[in-house]
């Protein structure tokens, strides 16, 4: 195996024996083969589109296949084997359609050479051996490899957000078309400038996809509101739901109503507490615990069933006892965990197994008490725009620091806690994603009633932060978004954060600090391009970075 798609990759180079995340070699290789098969599908999708015979039947499959390979999403080899088999069947059907469409348009048979991803076939017994030949290192040139992987890694984030939106009935053909275009491009020998252009187009597509998901979530559940979220526990047994899928949240709340079973969020699902549609449920108690990497202790002490709707899922340790309480759904998979099937068309998922399990479990063990405040998405912040603008003009707010992104296990991430603690009292932190857990329980106070930590929501709600910045640019009559009193100190871990990073670059944001380390998949030459064009820089010391940010650097 060779995997370097996440921030914790071994020695910041690549995992070659077993993932630092816990991913076995066999699983990593199957994920590589699934991406290879998706490339083959994309080759035919692109060719059919060129012939005027575009096929939309594989849009969802491609997005879900990419999503399943995101760090800490799916650990189940049987699921990957099934997806590869289905992918080959879909690709071969497309092949037949393409040959027929080509002959109909040109009056002759297609006889040009196709990339191997479009022609290789095999049975499950051959997958393991084939997978070893199609991974990251199959591309020998370091810079070409870097650009292709930056493209695919960002594309995985786009695919995740597109899948969330599609579940709520929101899709755009141009987003799905680009997913296919990007996948197909990695089977071609393209000039460097074309590869860089495609990487930047991932950022543009990420903005559009996050906007679509924002529209989907707010249409279905209302605009997030400023909310005090309980972090204590009740006396009833509970179900803990984590991940990003709001449709699963909605259906779980409906199916637990009146059962005597409470519902709590964990990690990435915390922002569900901010949506008006979910506040009517009295048994929606609040949030339990912190970010994803605390699962081994917090899932244990929760005592009840846990539902994983998306990443991140941490492998159980030998002393963990909650496997019989662990349920997965959607793209998530874990060997020997119960998987909740997809909803039938027009219907809902069946969460009755979780409800019945919860009734046999004791209530959650209390690990903390109190509340945390969130719900500062763009609609809510823009409603306070006059107050915010006045605070900036009066000098009460000197600077905003965007500290969005991911949390993780690495000790170096204490940097973000220390930055939050040491920023001057006239600064406001804008955050989204699980990076917030490094400082959202600190007592950082407020500025004239404006909390010093404004949590917009999940990582995809980084879109809200971009909307806020663009609105401030308009209000202050600025020509360049980089003239705002805003600094970017971003924490990354997995592939959705890469999509968010590329989205910010596509909006023209420069001077981003990225940590705890720069991505291993950036070759020195590719990193140099990003540094020279966008002034991306690694984090430094807490004191040095704060001084530089306050000086506008």
Image (cartoon, helix red, strand yellow):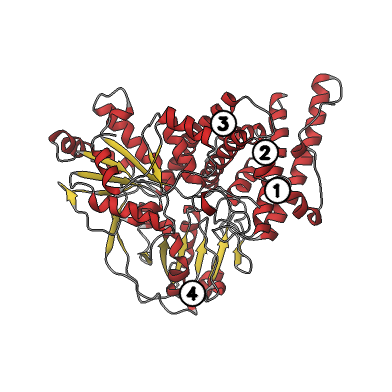
Left or right position of 83 against 484: right
Gap between marks 4 and 2, in whole Å?
49 Å
Residue ID for mark 3: 174
Q: Closer to the N terminus: mark 2 or mark 3?
A: 2
Gap between marks 3 and 4, in whole Å?
43 Å
Gap between marks 4 and 1, in whole Å?
38 Å
Residue ID for mark 2: 139
Q: Closer to the N terminus: mark 3 or mark 1?
A: 1
Badge number at residue 33: 1
Mark 3 crowd level (few <14, some 14–19, many ≥20, 10 Å Cα): few
* Circle 4/circle 2 CB separation < 8 Å: no
Task: Give the image location of residue 475, x and y in percent.
Answer: 25, 28
Query: At numbered mark 4, what does the secondary structure look like: helix, strand or loop?
Result: helix
Residue 202 in view of the camera: no
Left or right position of 119 against 454: right
Q: Closer to the N terminus: mark 4 or mark 2?
A: 2
Residue ID for mark 4: 358
Task: Give the image location of residue 109, x and y in percent.
Answer: 86, 25
State the residue at coordinates (49%, 67%): 306
Is 361 above or below relative to 186?
A: below
State the residue at coordinates (81%, 35%): 96
Query: At numbered mark 3, what does the secondary structure look like: helix, strand or loop?
Result: helix
Gap between marks 2 and 3, in whole Å?
28 Å
Residue 169 in view of the camera: yes
Q: Which of marks 3 and 1 is in front?
A: 1
Query: At numbered mark 2, what does the secondary structure look like: helix, strand or loop?
Result: loop
Q: Closer to the N terminus: mark 3 or mark 4?
A: 3
Query: At numbered mark 1, what does the secondary structure look like: helix, strand or loop?
Result: helix
State the residue at coordinates (38%, 52%): 435
Observer-nearest residue: 526 or 469? 526
Q: Quadrant of residue 437?
A: bottom left
Observer-nearest residue: 84 or 23? 23
């Amino acid at each position: 195996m060779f995997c370097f798609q996440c921030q914790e990759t071994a020695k910041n180079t690549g995992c070659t024996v077993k993932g630092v995340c816990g991913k076995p070699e066999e699983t990593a290789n199957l994920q590589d083969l699934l991406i290879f098969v998706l490339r083959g599908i994309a080759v035919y999708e692109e060719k059919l589109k060129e012939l005027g015979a575009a096929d939309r039947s594989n849009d969802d499959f491609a997005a879900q296949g990419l999503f399943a390979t995101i760090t800490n999403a799916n650990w189940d080899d049987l699921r990957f084997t099934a997806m590869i088999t289905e992918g080959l069947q879909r690709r071969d059907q497309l092949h037949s359609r393409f040959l027929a469409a080509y002959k109909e348009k040109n009056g002759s048979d297609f006889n040009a050479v196709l990339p191997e991803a479009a022609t290789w076939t095999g049975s499950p017994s051959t997958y393991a051996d084939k997978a070893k030949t199609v991974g990251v290192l199959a591309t020998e040139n370091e810079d070409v490899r870097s650009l292709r992987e930056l493209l695919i890694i960002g594309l995985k984030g786009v695919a995740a957000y597109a899948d969330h939106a599609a579940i709520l009935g929101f899709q755009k053909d141009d987003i799905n078309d680009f997913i296919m275009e990007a996948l197909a491009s990695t089977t071609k020998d393209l000039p460097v400038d074309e590869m860089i252009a495609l990487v930047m187009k991932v950022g543009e597509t990420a903005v559009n996809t996050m906007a679509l998901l924002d529209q989907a979530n707010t249409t279905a559940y209302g605009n997030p509101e400023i909310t005090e979220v309980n972090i204590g526990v009740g006396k009833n047994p509970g179900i803990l739901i984590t991940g990003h899928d709001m449709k699963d949240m909605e259906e779980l709340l409906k199916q637990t109503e009146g059962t005597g079973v409470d519902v709590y969020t964990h990690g990435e699902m915390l922002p569900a507490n901010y949506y008006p549609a979910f506040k009517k449920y009295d048994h929606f108690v609040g949030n339990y615990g912190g970010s994803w990497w605390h699962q081994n202790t917090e899932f244990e002490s929760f005592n009840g069933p846990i539902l994983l709707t998306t990443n991140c899922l941490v492998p159980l340790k030998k002393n963990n006892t909650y496997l019989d309480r662990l349920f997965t759904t959607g793209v998530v998979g874990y060997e020997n965990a119960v998987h909740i099937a997809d909803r039938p068309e027009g219907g809902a998922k069946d969460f009755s197994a979780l409800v019945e399990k919860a009734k046999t479990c004791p209530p959650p063990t209390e690990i903390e008490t109190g509340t945390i405040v969130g719900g500062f998405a763009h609609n809510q912040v823009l409603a306070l725009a006059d107050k915010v603008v006045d605070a900036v003009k009066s000098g009460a707010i000197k600077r905003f620091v965007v500290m969005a992104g991911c949390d993780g296990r690495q000790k170096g991430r204490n940097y973000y806690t220390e930055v939050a603690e040491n920023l001057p009292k006239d600064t406001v932190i804008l955050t989204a994603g699980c990076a917030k857990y490094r400082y959202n329980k600190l007592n950082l106070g407020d500025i004239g009633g404006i909390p010093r930590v404004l949590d917009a929501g999940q990582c995809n709600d980084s879109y809200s932060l971009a909307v806020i910045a663009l609105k401030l640019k308009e209000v202050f009559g600025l020509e360049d978004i980089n003239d705002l009193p805003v600094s970017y100190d971003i924490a990354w871990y997995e592939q959705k954060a890469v999509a968010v990073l590329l989205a910010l670059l596509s909006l023209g944001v420069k001077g981003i600090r990225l940590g705890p380390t720069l991505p291993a998949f950036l070759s020195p030459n590719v990193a140099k391009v990003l540094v020279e064009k966008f002034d991306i820089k690694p984090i430094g010391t807490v004191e040095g970075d704060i001084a530089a940010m306050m000086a506008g650097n």
